């Protein structure tokens, strides 16, 4: 019996004999085309991959065992397989550091389709440079690029992985992205990958004048690319762009532009490529994928920012406040401080003196809070109410911050009431919040009884 897990149940070895008996002396395997789970690996295959028995692979993924990956191979041929036909191809296996001539086909067991892969030839590459240049076709490299963009959860992680794939394909010293700020008329190097031993340049390439790149932009618009095979033979040594490239020890480069509404908005390039120089198709195809992905992710980030940000003050909003409270409930702290702040009579101010003045007080209050608590999330939870949490700050620092806040409020003549609560005995967060809010309202009543309404607003905010 062969035992597997997941969607594959117990299967009799006799049903597999038809497919494997002729291949027992070869490196071959059978895997589920939907789950990628390994069902069979021949004895030569076991030895090839350093396995002892079927227990070492049953229930595990083919891409994990055979390719050393944690996700399906971007070059997987499952989608290309057709019943009754064999699909032949060559592939370099990173785990074994060897190339193979491979034959794939579909077999059916108990009404379910499986992949049968047979390896006919394994051969070592003698020249490492040739291995690197031929291990990926342009199509496979593009699949790797798409995979890199889809796997990363953060835009920087995804783009950096994408640049690595392209950089390695061309065996470049560096791959990078520049984005244009047309309002400021500058270009910024926003993403970068460097091969081993190459010095990062991203911090040195910020705020470059677009005038400096006028020749590049002209080439982008006319030919869709900018290619230099020899810096000294093809560029004006008196030019500023020549000076910048020479300072980075760049001798050749390839770059393709990003377009938006018919205008160049940036470019993507590689420095000192040494392989696949004749293949610029990857650069052009990949540039479209990366720009679309960057635009999409930025839109998602903007939407996420908007859903958690108060647009008037730039502070966190009530949605973020609710999520933060839920998170803090699950965490443990040695101590916790809670601060509530409310602008006194904001509604009356808006109705009587105008919303512009009310907004001015809100913005100035936000600035005071961020000045006093620069590394703390501050929430605007309502029209006139602000809340912040001070986990593990300690009693002395918390009290010091509260004194500092009081001084700022008096200096700016802000018409507000503040309530705070501190605990290091393990009191529930909700209890602390209620206590701080009650203290704020107590102070608010005190202000009202002493000053009435207009008195506190009369002189306005100090500039």
Image: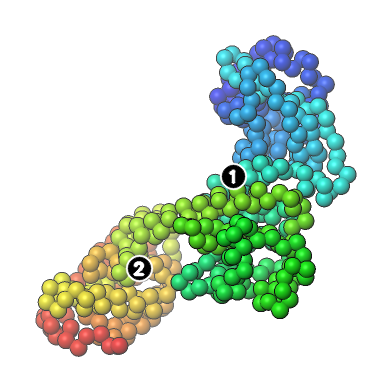
Above or below, 196 against 211 in this view is: above
Could you say which quadrant of the image residue 135 lies in?
A: top right
Say what secondary structure mark 1 lies in.
helix
- In this view, the residue in front, 162 or 42, is 162
Above or below, 214 against 58 in this view is: below
Left or right: 168 with respect to 344?
A: right
Say what secondary structure mark 2 lies in.
loop
Left or right: 307 with respect to 288?
A: left
| CA–CA distance in space, label 2 to label 1 | 35 Å
Residue at x 77%, y 15% (from the top left corner) = 21
Percent position of residue 14, x then y: 69, 11
Percent position of residue 213, x then y: 60, 70
Residue at x 80%, y 37% (from the top left corner) = 99
Q: Residues at badges 2 and 1 in contact (C-beta under 8 Å)?
A: no
Could you say which quadrant of the image residue 114 lies in?
A: top right
Percent position of residue 296, x then y: 46, 52
- In this view, the residue in front, 373 or 68, is 68
Percent position of residue 338, x then y: 33, 68
Q: Can residue 321 be seen?
A: yes
Neighbours of disc 1 within 10 Å: few (<14), some (14-19), many (20+): some
Residue at x 35%, y 77% (from the top left corner) = 367
Q: Residue 358 carries which label?
A: none
Residue where numbered disc 2 is placed: 315
Q: Which residue lies furthest to the front in this view?
A: 222
Could you say which quadrant of the image residue 418 lies in?
A: bottom left
Residue where numbered disc 1 is placed: 147
Above or below, 337 against 147 in this view is: below
Neighbours of disc 2 within 10 Å: few (<14), some (14-19), many (20+): many
Total labels: the figure holds: 2
Camera-side mark, 2 or 1: 1
């Amino acid at each position: 019996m062969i035992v597997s897990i997941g969607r594959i149940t117990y299967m009799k070895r006799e049903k597999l004999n038809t497919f494997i008996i002729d291949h027992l002396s070869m490196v071959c395997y059978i895997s589920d085309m939907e789950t990628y789970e390994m069902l069979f690996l021949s004895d030569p295959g076991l030895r090839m991959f350093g396995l002892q028995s079927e227990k070492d692979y049953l229930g595990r993924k083919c891409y994990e065992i055979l390719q050393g990956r944690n996700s399906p191979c971007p070059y997987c041929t499952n989608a290309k397989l057709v019943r009754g036909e064999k699909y032949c191809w060559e592939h370099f296996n990173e785990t074994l550091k060897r190339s193979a001539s491979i034959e794939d086909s579909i077999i059916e067991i108990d009404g379910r389709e499986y992949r049968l892969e047979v390896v006919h030839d394994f051969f070592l590459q003698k020249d490492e440079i040739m291995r690197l240049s031929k291990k990926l076709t342009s199509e496979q490299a593009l699949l790797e690029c798409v995979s890199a963009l889809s796997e990363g959860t953060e835009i920087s992680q995804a783009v950096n992985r994408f640049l690595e794939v392209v950089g390695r394909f061309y065996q470049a010293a560096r791959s990078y992205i520049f984005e244009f700020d047309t309002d400021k008329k500058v270009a910024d190097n926003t993403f970068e990958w460097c091969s081993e031993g190459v010095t990062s340049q991203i911090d040195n390439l910020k705020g470059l004048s677009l005038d400096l790149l006028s020749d590049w932009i002209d080439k982008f618009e006319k030919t869709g690319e900018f290619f230099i095979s020899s810096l000294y033979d093809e560029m004006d040594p008196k030019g500023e762009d020549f000076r910048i490239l020479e300072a980075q020890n760049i001798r050749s480069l390839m770059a393709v532009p990003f377009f938006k509404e018919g205008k160049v908005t940036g470019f993507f390039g590689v420095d000192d490529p040494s392989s696949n120089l004749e293949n610029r198709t990857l650069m052009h195809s990949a540039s479209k994928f990366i720009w679309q992905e960057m635009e999409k992710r930025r839109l998602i980030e903007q939407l996420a920012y908007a859903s958690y940000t108060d647009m008037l003050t730039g502070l966190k909003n009530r949605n973020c406040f609710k999520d933060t409270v839920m998170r803090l409930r699950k965490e443990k702290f040695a101590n916790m401080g809670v601060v509530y702040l409310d602008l006194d009579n904001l509604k009356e101010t808006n109705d009587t003196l105008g919303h512009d003045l009310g907004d001015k007080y809100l913005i100035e209050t936000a600035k005071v809070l961020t000045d006093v608590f620069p590394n703390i999330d501050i929430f605007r939870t309502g029209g006139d109410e602000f809340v912040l949490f001070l986990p593990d700050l300690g009693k002395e620092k918390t009290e010091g911050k509260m004194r500092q806040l009081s001084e700022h409020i008096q200096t700016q003549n802000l018409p507000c009431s503040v309530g705070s609560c501190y605990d290091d005995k393990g009191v529930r967060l909700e209890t602390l919040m209620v206590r701080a809010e009650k203290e704020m309202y107590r102070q608010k009543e005190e202000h009202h009884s002493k000053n009435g309404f207009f008195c506190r607003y009369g002189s306005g905010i100090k500039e």
